Amino acid sequence: MIRARNIRKRAALAATSTGLAVALVSGCGGGGSPAADSLAPTSAGPSVTDTAPAVPTTDPTPPAPTSAPTPTPAPSPPPAPTATATAAPSPVRPTSRPPAPPSTAPPATTPTTRPSTPTPTRAVTPTKAVTTAPPADGASSLWGRQYQGTTRVTVQLYDYCSPNGARRPAGSQTYSMPTSLTVERPREAGGLRENNPFALVLSVGQPSQTGAFTLGTSVTVAAGSGQLLLTYWKLSWDSGTLRGQLTDNHVREAAALNLVNWATLLVPCRPELGTLPGGMPHSVAVGASLSGKLTATSTSLTAKGASDDGLVEFAFEFSGSR
């Protein structure tokens, strides 16, 4: 306690001495100044009171450091609204050309499934039909040809007038008749085609004449709402050589085409009573034959056969040309 008072007294004395020294320095020269007059009444210094200011001791204990208070975090500002940035449209550059017309094509659609790989297809190129003449050595080269000539006919006649009713010879005749031969394309009807190199029609004399012959390889006839093909002969032709045989006379269908026209007695076995005028057609029997030469310019054919009733046997030779 006493020590503290002494310290305070020393401090007061030191302060008074310092104030006097300042006043002396300020009043030197020039006969004095107002500052010196003002310092005179206060030269005595401050009065000493019982309560002196606290003077630190020589061994003070430094105060413990105090940590700075943790600042309270400021509240987060509210989030700024997010705005979608829209790019400003680019300026349109003027052009001297007129604007293109709007497209009328529909927008392309994107397939949802993978299309299958198409199988290439080979393109077929249509060819122009070329019509050429048939080869000179082919049977088709004879189609549409006609031959004219003469046929020499030999006929052997028979009847059934024997006492026992057996067939017997009844005479023979030989004669000649104008003849025509027509070669045609094989006939077709009802989805069928004649299986011959060509169709033949051989006409010896006029059909109504006695001794006339008609030979034909095929014919088409009306059958209901369509056509029916009937084939009579089987032909072969090779390098101008012709062979044929009558395979079906179609008598069952009442469509006999191969005929020989011959006189028929009014009364069987009574020739003295006369014959039917104009003769009577007799169907040629299956097995008749035809053979010879047939070329582009001429023909020479031989036919042999008999009537279906056995009354007429014949053989003839035809020579003709175009």
Image (tube, rainbow, N blue to C red):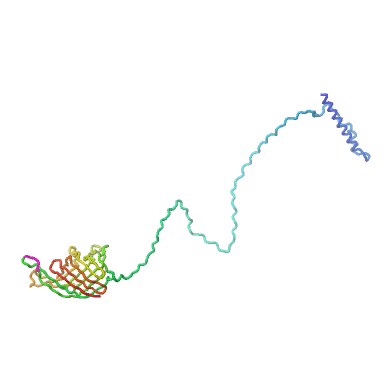
| Residue at the extreme top of the image, as rendered | 2
Most frequent secondary structure within the magenta stretch: loop
| Relative image position of residue 308 (x, y in whole percent) | 15, 66
Q: Residue at x 66, y 37 (%)?
A: 73
Q: Residue at x 45, y 52 (%)?
A: 114
| Relative image position of residue 142 (x, y in whole percent) | 27, 71
- 49 or 25: nearer the eye? 25
| Relative image position of residue 180 (x, y in whole percent) | 22, 73
In the rendered image, residue 286 lying in the magenta stretch gets the answer no
| Relative image position of residue 213 (x, y in whole percent) | 18, 71
- Picture mark count: 0
Task: Note whether 122 is above or below 205 in the view shown.
Answer: above
Task: Note whether 57 is above or below 212 in the view shown.
Answer: above
| Residue at the extreme left of the image, as rendered | 163
- 34 or 158: nearer the eye? 158
The image quarter containing residue 66 is top right
Q: Is residue 266 left or right of residue 5?
A: left
| Residue at the extreme right of the image, as rendered | 31
- 180 or 137: nearer the eye? 137
Q: Residue at x 83, y 25 (%)?
A: 3
The image quarter containing residue 276 is bottom left
Q: Is residue 85 left or right of residue 137?
A: right
Q: Is residue 174 left or right of residue 42?
A: left
Which quadrant does the N terminus fall into?
top right
Q: Which residues are magenta?
A: 164-168
Which quadrant does the C terminus fall into?
bottom left
